[in-house]
Image (cartoon, grey):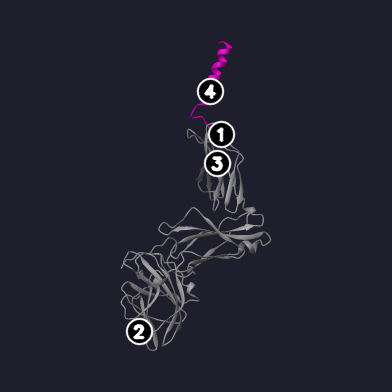
Amino acid sequence: MNKAVFLAGALMLGAIACDDPTAPISRPINLWYQLEPSGVILHWDPVLDANLEVYNVYGRLDGSSVYDLRGTTTSPSFHDEGQPDLEYRVTAVSVEGVESDFSEEVIIDERLRLESPAAIWTVSLDGAILVAWDDNAFINEPDGFKNYRVYSTGYDLDADLCDEVWTLEGTTVSPEFLVSVLTNGVPLCFGVSAESIEGWESMWSALIADTPRPEARNVLLTPQQVDLAFSGFRFFEDTNVDGFADDNELGLIRAGNRPDIDFVIDLSAPDVFIQPVRTGVEVALYPGGLVDDLTSITVAPVGGYSPVAITAEPGFGYVFEIDEGDGFFRYGAIRVTHVGQQFIIFDWSYQTDPGNPELSIRGGLPASDKGGLIVKGHK
């Protein structure tokens, strides 16, 4: 065969091979990472191939889990926001959809991080949520500790899922943080990390959901036998029928002979009683009876509610289950601070989110599972 012809044929075959849509594409190499307060940034060498379209980034939470697709990018870097995975790998994908082999894996080096907070809990407040956690990151490495970082996002109570886009609420050197100016009845998720003096961020704490709710302190009612006009109470009435709990629709003191109140204070000397009134309202003693504060009344108990009157005792907590007839229960709580023959004084809270039993933190008491629980009416 003529040498020139042979060379021309070889060049043609080479050109055909380059245009082969099934031809493999090189895998990314030199994968490394950079920790930042908002997550982790992955970097790798660009794949120099004209057929390159995108990179796929995969991650997994531990060494035994399956890799999940974290995202796709056209750049040789990727910012994985929020709580990072433990291990990552990257592939290149051609315009024809052919995916390369995995890059080498990169493991987020925990030796460069502080410990994540070992536990996290919350206290539901009026228009606010107090987030608190174990101080182990500081206690175990005080010389390397800089601060804690508190994150929040929305929470879908129906699906028991936190939203994907997180916001930094702020930083603090204390193991607690008050998140304020919140809308009552709107659930949120929270997570906390610890940042070292070098700027490395720990893995996040466990995630926790909570819902702010209205409350008031030192409300005075009289027994109906003493002053009927100030003996009744209703947690919430949507008087303008707009579906929202306005301030003037909450904590309503009314006459004890009205059929639309939640409960009335009744005197049968020497005892004072809390008597549910309108249909669908029942009351239960909070598990354990005595509570230190209104915020100690955590998640509404699973059962034990009754329309029968219950004795009012100083320092005791009571939870009301209210069936509004729309398929969901509402929950209110009171903590009685004073009981006398002429009047009682109590603090109250009310969860405006339908079906949500969260009244405050869990507190270790036997109560409904707050993880995504919606309590539906059935009576």
Residue, disc 3? 90
Q: Residues within 10 Å of mark 3 (few under 14, many from 20)?
A: many
CA–CA distance in space, label 3 to label 1:
11 Å
Q: Is residue 269 above or below residue 207?
A: below
Identity of the residue drawn at 53% across and 43% down: 57
Residue behind mark 4: 15
Tag in front: 2 or 4: 2
Q: Quadrant of residue 257?
A: bottom left
Q: Nearer the viewer, mark 3 or mark 4?
A: 4
Q: Main secondary structure of the magenta part?
A: helix
In three-dimensional space, the C-alpha distance between marks 4 and 1, rounded to whole angstroms, equals 18 Å
Task: Kindly identify the residue that appears in the image at 62 percent across and 57 percent down.
Answer: 195
Q: Is residue 306 magenta?
A: no
Label 1 sits on what residue type? Answer: Ser
Identify the magenta region: 1-24
Image: 349 above or below 60: below
Closest to the camera, between mark 2 and mark 1, is 2
Mark on residue 228?
A: 2
Gap in Å between the C-alphas at discs 2 and 4?
97 Å
Q: Earlier in the sequence, mark 2 or mark 3?
A: 3
Locate the C terminus by quadrant.
bottom left
Where in the figure is residue 95, as x and y percent of width and height? 49, 33
Which label's residue is closer to the chain start, 3 or 1? Answer: 1
Q: Are marks 2 and 1 in contact (CB under 8 Å)?
A: no
Question: Residue furthest toward the right?
Answer: 143
